[in-house]
Image (cartoon, coloured by chain):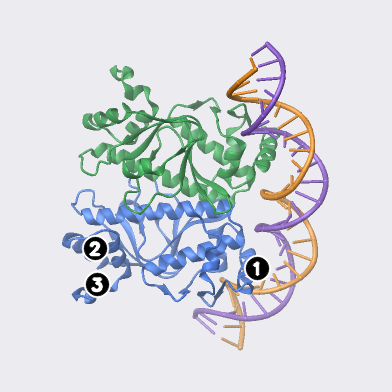
Chain colours: A green, B blue, C orange, D purple
Amino acid sequence: MNYLNSSPEAEMPAIRRLQELAPLDAQDLAALRASVGAPRHIPARREMPASIWEAHGTVLILEGWAHRSGLLADGRRQITGILLPGDTLASSSVAGSVDGTLTAITPLTYCLLPNSTTAPLAGLTQALDANRAIAEKLLRRQVVRLGRLDASERLADWLLEIYERLEAVGSSSNDTMSFPATQEVMADALGLTSVHINRVLSVLRRDDILTVQGGRVVFHNRDRCRSTSMRF
Amino acid sequence: MNYLNSSPEAEMPAIRRLQELAPLDAQDLAALRASVGAPRHIPARREMPASIWEAHGTVLILEGWAHRSGLLADGRRQITGILLPGDTLASSSVAGSVDGTLTAITPLTYCLLPNSTTAPLAGLTQALDANRAIAEKLLRRQVVRLGRLDASERLADWLLEIYERLEAVGSSSNDTMSFPATQEVMADALGLTSVHINRVLSVLRRDDILTVQGGRVVFHNRDRCRSTSMRF
DNA sequence: CGCGTTATTGACGTGTTTCAAGATCTGTGG
DNA sequence: CCACAGATCTTGAAACACGTCAATAACGCG
């Protein structure tokens, strides 16, 4: 415990996580604080206009959940990733327009970090790079999940992943987490139908693996969940 | 046409592509030429030790095909991406060990680009960034494919993607491309079984969409292929 | 030419979807 | 505080896409 406890970077999990990814000096922290000092909000279910993070800098999620998804011509939707506090969205400044859509699952708080191409914010740049590498890893895991796991494996693995990511920002513990996604969101994330999600959830509950109820997930046996996890 | 036609960067498609992604100055080109001048080789089917690109710099594919895949405990395999000439593999210097395995599909030629964290190779850095953004886009597309397309849609979309990527390095044209992947590789890339790949291929041939035969793909109707493509 | 790998085909099993109906939850206005 | 409406969840029966098993054919390489 030190004097930082009362400063913004100690209270804001998103900032604490960036600090863990790379050492941030006074300049980095100043830039961060400036951005976080101007938070923006999106109501639940609202889509974030691509223009926001296209032109401006990198998006840093401060509070709430969001998802990134792609849409097919006939309406089929696939969520490619879930965004949690501490996650960043690299502005793909280079390669044409951004792909996918960002939608808030809960009321969302975020801020825009300056694209430090000019500035000497080495620490911040490094943290964002690390975050990008982590995001890529998660994306690959999502590919394996969709390609080679069956429905209950997908659900267990996915919920476990989210639990562990939330744990990193102090938002889950004791095998429990808040879970604001509807079964339709789960379906779109896992490449299934909401009907089947419902059936699989009841099986997982019957087998005493985990329970999803009232916006919360409780794991009854986290090790059993991991039994079908991947070894890359 | 200019005097560059006889220089290495004009003959090597991989280099030409990097030049298209960002303006490379003399210094960038010199660094590139130095790396390309020391090419390395991997025989077909051989796995590339993670250590190679973990410690050293970024891998640049010069010739041949490779794939990146993840393995489950019980042997199930999922290919997360195909690597073609001009593609790069960012050394995730930061976030722990690399995930996935890199395996050569054909005999592979690659080189190692220096991690220019220190050097002032702005152009090269920018080109690699662009390449990384493109790779992420492809990865997201792979997620949508696996999550929401049925078998024939997956195959058509995937083959089309590869065709277009090869086109960018001048390795495909006239609705035709060389295609060194076995049906088992296709299956592992698309989350299906090789048996089912075989059946779907015969349907696509019957419907006069495309033909895969003797290590080549011929599209009979590229527009029809695209009919189920995605609009993000 | 012969052998291992790859491709092909058929019959059958199963996981997931579809369709549809009803129950429960959530928030909102009276 | 209740009543209502829309969203979400739940459940069943039937259809379908894809997997599994297995046997044979074709290919490619030494």
Q: State the SS at label 3.
A: helix
Question: Could you tell me how far apart the alpha carbons at marks 1 and 3 are, in whole angstroms?
Answer: 43 Å
Q: Position of residue B129 (x, y in %)?
A: 31, 52
Depicted B18 relative to depicted A76: above or below: below
Chain at numbered mark 2 = B
Q: Is residue D23 left or right of residue A168?
A: right
Residue occupied by mark 2: B32
User: Is disc 1 in the same subunit as disc 3?
Assistant: yes
Residue occupied by mark 3: B8
Q: Earlier in the sequence, mark 2 or mark 3?
A: 3
Judge the density around disc 2: few (<14), some (14-19), many (≥20) Cα neighbours within 10 Å: many
Q: Is residue B96 visible?
A: no
Residue occupied by mark 1: B199
Depicted B54 relative to depicted B162: above or below: above
Q: Is residue B114 left or right of residue A176?
A: left
User: Is disc 1 in the same subunit as disc 2?
Assistant: yes
Q: Earlier in the sequence, mark 1 or mark 3?
A: 3
Q: Position of residue C27 (x, y in %)?
A: 58, 24
Q: Is residue B101 visible?
A: yes
Q: Position of residue A187 (x, y in %)?
A: 60, 42
Dot 2 amino acid type: Leu
Dot 3 amino acid type: Pro
Instruction: Specify the quadrant of the image occupied by residue A3.
Output: top left
Label disc, if present, on residue A180 of the rendered structure: none
Give whichever of A231, A8 is nearer the camera. Answer: A8
Chain at numbered mark 3 = B
Dot 1 amino acid type: Arg
